[in-house]
């Protein structure tokens, strides 16, 4: 060990704790090098956290709280080598006299040794200008898929793929937030932590109302995939007897292992199938979905497989869900909707959510449409891993992750990465003999409406701009627009949201082409390192218009087909870094991220080739 370096570090850490000179009477920390890249940190009287400095581009080091137990797990942390991007808290055992932390694969001259701090607090006050106001985000760190969504005792539990040790993917835990109204979220400690079996990948939860598992009536039982290089992807279970706050992992995990050496076998969705009084589990198995059944949530038998060749091809199936929805609002005629998240597969590149309408006989899913039929739950680029809450009675509420695997880890936020899109209520509607799902934000969002500005009806004539400035006084970038267009002679009818910097989101109907378009090409920061691949569409589709210019993965327009109708309604939700549009009561949903350098505070309507009516536009500031 190099004594001088060690002594200097000791002083630095003591100072970080606010102690004068190196007379440490409270928390104390000693580094012991074992070889060139393994450090054992001995901490006397540990405070709550060891604050670890992170450099996002650095290689991962392995950090482990060493209790000497078999459950000790390495966490991968990008410890700062040359610069500190931010700190993450590494929790130390409460009320212990000492703690030992081992760090592997890190050089002795890395900057982290100077910067590491012991602390009783970790500051989570927001530092990101793009943090949404009314969308759920983690306090800090990385988030992807919503997991284990369950409603119990008046509380919605939103678990999510979470990295508590950095704002890029890694160390999958189930993070945890709780809400009574799907809008105001209280952040809780992660509910299920990465362990020696692997990362805690996506999954679902159920309320075991009849105590089929033996853990007690009303226990919440969670299902997830443990993923590691060593064990592959295996399905595991955990249960909560304190209403979803903490979970105990089942001692006989895994409950299901892949067959034939299948590599991609994950994201278990469990639901109760009342007609046969049994539980069903769907697991995404490469490009198909596998069905299993159980009476006790622990022992599962194989039922069937579905999906080969269905939807966009050939794409990885992930995060299944299956829900029942009434046809034409008639609860005695229910249809099953299979939600299949695919990556890649989005028309516009990257990840997206498809669904299939059909029947389920307790063993097989039978899709109503031919294999090549593709139905999208959302037509934007930032809607993925959408799954639904369990135990919500007649309401079917989906929560998407609002990003895309193409660029989720490089978007220009730091303290946190990724938000959820607005929770959406799903219903079926019929069009040209086919059943489709519409997605509309849950009604609870209306409780966020603050001041309203009412823009009276007016006619838009071709080749003229109709600007309205400001859109809102004191506009902080969190608002809702509700408007209706009556179709006239114009071929194009639309509006632009823009700011003083001429950053713009362009939203328009191209009626001759029956397209509804959202163009974020010039929406603000668009060049944040997402691989600029000109015309890089993974799923070119013949219905795409050559008139839409695809520049790269982020700077592009997305579009959806629209039916001919005398008028169209639009509900638009803007929240710092996102625009979600719900057309005609959610028949088309379109969710796209944006990163404007200042809020768009001007709306300008325009038309081409004739006139149309704006039948009024309401602008609401949304706040918590
Ligand atoms: C989907 C997904 C899941 C997996 C999880 C890992 O976004 O790839 O299939 O369980 O993310 O974080």
Image: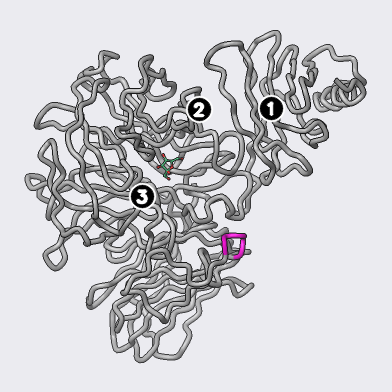
Residue 426 image point, x, y percent: 26, 50
Q: Is mark 1 within 8 Å of ligand 1?
A: no
The magenta region covers 527-531
Residue furthest out toward the left: 332
411 sits to left or right of 153: right
Vertical arrangement, residue 127 with respect to residue 193, above or below: below
**For residue 123, side relative to residue 298 (left or right):** right
Please tell me whether mark 2 or mark 1 is closer to you in this view: 1
Q: Residue at x 50, y 24 (%)?
A: 195
Q: Is residue 529 magenta?
A: yes
Asked where in the image residue 537 lies, by quadrant, the reply is bottom left
Q: Callout 1: few (<14), some (14-19), or many (20+) C-alpha neighbours within 10 Å?
A: some
Measured from the top left, where is residue 431 in percent x and y? 16, 65
Q: As rendered, which of 597 and 450 lies closer to the eye?
A: 597
| Within-10-Å neighbours for mark 3: few <14, some 14–19, many 20+ | some
Mark 2, secondary structure of its residue: loop
Towards the viewer: 40 or 595: 40
Q: Earlier in the sequence, mark 3 or mark 1?
A: 1
Left or right relative to 394: residue 41: right
Q: Name which quarter of the figure residue 268 lies in.
A: top left
Asked if residue 132 is positioned above or below residue 105 in the image, the reply reads: below
- In reply to whether residue 609 is colored magenta, the answer given is no
Element type at mark 3 = strand
Q: Residue at x 63, y 44 (%)?
A: 415
Q: Are marks 3 and 2 in contact (CB under 8 Å)?
A: no
The residue pinned by badge 3 equals 316
Compared with residue 25, is residue 321 higher up or lower down, i.e. above or below?
below
Q: Please tell me whether the stretch drawn in magenta is mainly helix, strand or loop.
A: loop
Check disc 2 and report the residue beneath it: 194
Can I make out residue 497 in this image?
A: no
Q: Nearer the viewer, residue 114 or 420?
A: 114
- Identify the residue under disc 1: 104
């Amino acid at each position: 060990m190099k004594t001088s370096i060690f002594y200097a570090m000791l002083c630095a850490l003591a100072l970080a704790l606010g102690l004068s000179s190196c007379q440490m009477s409270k928390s104390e920390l000693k580094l012991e090098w074992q070889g060139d890249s393994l450090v054992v940190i001995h901490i006397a009287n540990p405070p709550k956290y060891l604050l670890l400095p992170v450099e996002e581009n650095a290689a991962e080091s392995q950090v482990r709280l060493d209790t000497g137990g078999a459950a000790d797990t390495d966490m991968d942390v990008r410890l700062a080598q040359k610069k500190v991007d931010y700190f993450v808290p590494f929790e130390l055992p409460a009320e212990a006299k000492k703690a030992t932390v081992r760090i592997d694969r890190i050089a002795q001259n890395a900057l982290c040794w100077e910067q590491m701090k012991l602390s009783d607090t970790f500051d989570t006050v927001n530092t990101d200008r793009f943090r949404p106001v009314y969308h759920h985000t983690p306090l800090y760190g990385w988030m992807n898929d919503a997991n284990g969504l369950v409603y119990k005792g008046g509380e919605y539990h939103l678990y999510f793929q979470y990295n508590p040790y950095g704002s890029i993917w890694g160390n999958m835990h189930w993070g945890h937030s709780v809400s009574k109204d799907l809008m105001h979220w209280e952040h809780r400690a992660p509910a299920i932590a990465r362990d020696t079996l692997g990362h805690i990948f996506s999954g679902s939860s159920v309320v075991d109302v009849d105590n089929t598992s033996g853990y007690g009536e009303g226990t919440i039982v969670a299902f997830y995939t443990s993923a590691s290089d060593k064990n592959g992807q295996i399905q595991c279970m955990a249960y909560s007897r304190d209403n979803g706050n903490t979970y105990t992992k089942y001692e006989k995990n895994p409950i299901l292992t892949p067959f034939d050496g299948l590599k991609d076998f994950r994201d278990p969705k469990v639901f109760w199938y009342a007609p046969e009084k049994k539980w069903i589990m769907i697991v995404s198995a490469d490009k198909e979905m596998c069905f299993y059944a159980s009476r006790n949530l622990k022992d599962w038998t194989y039922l069937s497989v579905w999906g080969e060749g269905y939807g966009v091809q050939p794409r990885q199936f992930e995060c299944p869900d299956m829900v029942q929805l009434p046809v034409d609002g008639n609860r005695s005629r229910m249809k099953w909707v299979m939600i299949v998240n695919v990556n890649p597969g989005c028309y516009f590149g990257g990840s997206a959510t498809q669904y299939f309408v059909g029947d389920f006989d307790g063993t097989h899913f039978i899709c109503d449409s031919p294999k090549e039929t593709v139905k999208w739950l959302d037509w934007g680029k930032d809607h993925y891993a959408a799954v639904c809450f369990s135990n919500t009675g007649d309401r079917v509420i989906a929560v998407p992750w609002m990003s895309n695997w193409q660029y989720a880890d490089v978007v220009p936020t730091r303290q946190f990465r990724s938000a959820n899109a607005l929770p959406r209520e799903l219903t079926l509607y019929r069009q040209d003999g086919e059943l489709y799902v519409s997605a509309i934000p849950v009604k609870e969002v209306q409780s966020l409406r603050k001041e309203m500005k009412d823009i009276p009806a007016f006619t838009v004539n071709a080749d003229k701009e109709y600007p309205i400035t400001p859109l809102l006084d004191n506009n902080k970038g969190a608002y809702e627009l509700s408007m209706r267009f009556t179709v006239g002679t114009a071929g194009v009818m639309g509006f632009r949201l823009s700011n003083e910097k001429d950053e713009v989101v362009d939203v328009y109907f191209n009626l001759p082409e029956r397209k509804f378009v959202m163009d974020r090409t010039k929406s603000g920061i668009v060049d944040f390192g997402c691989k600029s691949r000109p015309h890089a569409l993974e799923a070119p589709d013949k219905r795409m218009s050559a008139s839409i210019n695809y520049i790269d993965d982020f700077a592009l327009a997305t579009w959806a087909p629209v039916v001919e109708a005398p008028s169209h309604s639009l509900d638009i939700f803007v929240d710092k870094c996102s625009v979600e549009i719900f057309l005609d009561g959610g028949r088309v949903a379109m969710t796209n991220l944006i990163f404007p350098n200042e809020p768009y505070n001007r709306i300008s309507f325009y038309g081409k080739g004739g006139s149309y009516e704006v039948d009024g536009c309401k602008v609401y500031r949304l706040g918590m």
